[in-house]
Image (cartoon, rainbow, N blue to C red):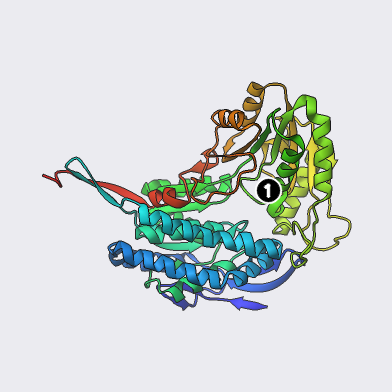
Amino acid sequence: MDSYLKFYIDGAWVDPVGDQRMTVIDPATEQPFAQIAMGSAADAERAIAAARHAFASFSLTPHEERLGLLERILVILKRRNDEMGDMISREMGAPRRMARDEQAGIGIAHFEQTIRAMRDFAFEYMQGTTRIVHEPIGVVGMITPWNWPINQIACKVAPALATGCTMVLKPSEIAPLNAILFAEVLHEAGVPKGVFNLVNGDGPTVGAVLSGHPDIDMVSFTGSTRAGISVAQAAAPTVKRVHQELGGKSPNIILPSADLDAAVRAGVDKCFANSGQSCNAPTRLLVPEEKMNQVIGIARQAAESVRVGPPVDPETDIGPVVSQTQFDKIQGLIRKGLEEGAELVAGGPDRPAHLNVGYYVRPTIFARVTNDMTIVREEVFGPVLVILGYHSDNEAAEIANDTPYGLASYVQGEAGEARAFARRLRTGIVRLNSSAWDGAAPFGGYKQSGNGREYGKFGLHEFTEIKGIVGFGD
């Protein structure tokens, strides 16, 4: 086993205070392949102190200096992209091809978008005789997940560096190795001492310190709604800013004007991508009731064509889910769907027949479900799709919005109808007609899907305070 037993604090790789260790499991084989050190409160406090000390000088660095730093990081990320993708594939199970192109590639895209946004961002401007100044918010605690690890690290770190913040990152302890590689990239790029710090650990220990510490000015958290509530509660006594990107149960509405075959197939593929482990996955498919039988047939064919297999196999479409815990949760929810009377269209409990080891889940579809069923209400976070029927546009909008979540939604249909319907959806993101990912669009949710926005110029806003210097122009 490889061992990664140091933390990156104050510009150097240092030994942890304690000796707690954790094994990293390959979800395709269920075997350990690496070991990391697990941080303590003392490690987190050491990293916070380094970030607080560095903030005094880094917050005052010129715009062009920070822009040059981002550009150097981007060059190194591109050079190490395949290495990053292979690491992500090994630790969280994404197919190797997808891990290189999308999982690692999206980290590059975030730095590119931040560089573009930074060049155009008005950090200072006059409003009458008042000078409006966007200043770095301070020391940021970052807590990131395992499902799109570099995506969430990059979309926090890039705008933090761009605005002059310093930071302490606690990545997921389930998939931590990509963050260690990322720290190597930042070190090579010449990030000043103390600006970026990395401490591995769990939520109740390192995460809790970052959330509650008085020297942390902002917590940026991505994860479950349950964990997000804990972060917000820990942060409340110090009245720090809390930015959260949480869970989702995203509707995908197929309007009567849509190309039914293309829309259903695209919806199935999008739901199952990354083994269903995306907070914005379109997991609720809403279709005209009169087309339900036709939709079921198309969806079944689409699900049966999805190739589940080892991440190293170039023919694999989806790999395993990340862990035994996640596998067990998904299996329990699939069985719950059967118990509650949902119609099983494809898949079902247990592994695919050709795989006897690894956390593999059969791509599963339930149809003719009702909005009170557990599989419709809860975020499964696996390759499980539910199909609901509707009788009118009003009913479709009502069903789509009848959820505690509000991260993303999808609409398929004639362009004018789709645009009009998008305005009725209570979500932070609406994607029309299988549109491509836009790294400059705001990303974040309504309701229990969180608060604040990431990506591009919206990320820059999140990491700044606004100061008005009145009388500046007198």
Q: Where's residue 350, x and y in %? A: 84, 52
Q: Residue furthest right?
A: 353
Q: Is residue 216 visible?
A: no
Q: Is residue 168 left or right of residue 343?
A: left
Residue at horizontal 80 percent and vertical 61 percent from the top: 309
Residue at horizontal 57 percent and vertical 32 percent from the top: 419
Quick one: quadrant of the N terminus?
A: bottom right
Q: Is residue 309 left or right of residue 90?
A: right
Residue at horizontal 17 percent and vertical 43 percent from the top: 470
- Residue 346 lies, with reference to residue 167, above or below; the image says above
Q: Where's residue 441, x and y in %? A: 50, 46
Q: Nearer the viewer, residue 452 or 2?
A: 452
The secondary structure type at the circle numbered 1 is: loop
- Residue 24 lies, with reference to residue 208, above or below; the image says below
Q: Nearer the viewer, residue 410 or 277?
A: 410
Residue bearing the label numbered 1: 381
Residue at horizontal 40 percent and vertical 73 percent from the top: 10
Q: Is residue 247 left or right of residue 387?
A: left
Q: Residues within 10 Å of mark 1 (few under 14, many from 20)?
A: many
Q: Amino acid at mark 1?
A: Phe
Q: Where's residue 60, x and y in %? A: 27, 63
Q: Where's residue 275, x and y in %? A: 72, 53
Q: Is residue 277 visible?
A: yes
- Residue 136 lies, with reference to residue 257, above or below; the image says below
